[in-house]
Amino acid sequence: MKDEFDHETNIAYLVFKRPGDATQNYYQCQYIESRDLSDIHDCDFVFAPFSTQSEAILFLKFDKELEKHELDSSLLCSKILEDISRAEYGLQFQKLKRRILNGDINKLVLSRIKAYRANKLLPQDIFNLLLTNYPDAFSYMLLIPDRMCWIGASPEPLLQESGGAFLSSALAGTQAVTLEPKDVFWGEKEREEHAFIETYLEESFRQAKLTYEKSDCYTVAAAEVCHIRSDFYLDKENDISELIKILHPGPALSGYPKELAVEMIPALEAHKRSYYTGYFGTLSKSLGLCLYANLRCMALYKEGAELYLGGGITKDSDEESEWQETELKSRTMGAVLEMLSNQKVQL
């Protein structure tokens, strides 16, 4: 695989800052596309889709470090922006809710796209504001000229090094931050949603004969929202690609049971998720393993941005409440875009 990186045309620009990093990282990269996860051992940074059925995994090698790189909007591609209306979302929700009440599935993450129409949004400006607004997230910007530009600030680790172990997390439930984390109350719906993720992870680790330690549940704040979280610690001798196959796409990104949810999502949702609810992060020897789920993200075009949003639907879910949850989540990216433009998000 290493020789495949020697193509001058496969150039990408990558900027990122992990939680705890003192500075931003700017790189010009070379990349290849592959659907074989074993290629992950030869790259410095990975950017993976929700499903390799529709998109390839991008494996990036750092070509050269840049002190500063102002990415111009002329490098963006053009697109007619997608937007999932309230009515469309409602139809999808009701169809899904019937399947859940019939006992076909316990939980499914239903997503939507929200269009923000504004000309000449600069990728670098958006990224800089994300760093200011969400310093505890893993923020990134990946731009392939005239092809794609994704920008995000994720609160959810998928797999990372933590001391002498690998760390993964079960993260679920969403409500606005109005109290200190220790004082937040979680209802039955949110606790059940979190329990699905814990159950899947524990069953999967046992089936793979992996030993693990699990923390108690606690509340964690992420931008304007908070979630229920518990942590799993695994031996660092485990193969990274095999762990990813277990962890992605887990119930937090797809549903429960996982296999059925992954099968249902393309038939239920009218749009392609592309790299939303995929994962991204570092794997280089110098920077170490730090992979995050690709949440709170957008795809940027010359005409504006597509914000990707979602939430877990269970038997206790209410349509209007779930729609409002996606609206709440849209503030992470939307607030940054509003700072850069006087235009309003068009629904």
Image (tube, helix red, strand yellow):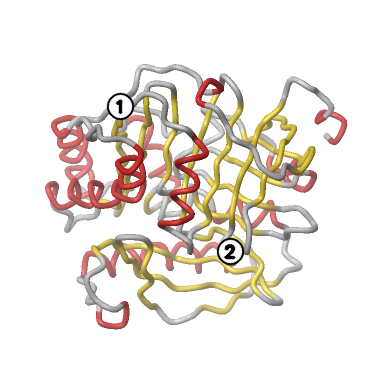
Name the residue rendered at 29%, 46% in the picture: 330
Q: Quadrant of the C terminus?
A: top left
For residue 207, the mark is 2
Element type at marker 2? helix
The location of residue 165, given as percent across then percent down, is: 67, 73
Side of 210 relative to 66 (left or right): left
User: In the picture shown, does residue 231 fall above or below 334?
Assistant: below
Q: Residue at (40%, 44%) from the top-left corner?
A: 260
In the figure, residue 170 lies in which quadrant? bottom left
Q: Quadrant of the N terminus?
A: top right
Q: Residue at x 51, y 44 (%)?
A: 278
Question: Tag 2: residue type?
Answer: Gln
Query: Label 1, on which residue?
Result: 117
Expressed as whole percent of the image width and height from the top left, the position of residue 37 reads 68, 42
Label 1 to label 2: alpha-carbon separation = 47 Å
Q: Position of residue 71 (x, y in %)?
A: 58, 32
The amino acid at mark 1 is Arg
Residue 172 appearing in the image: yes
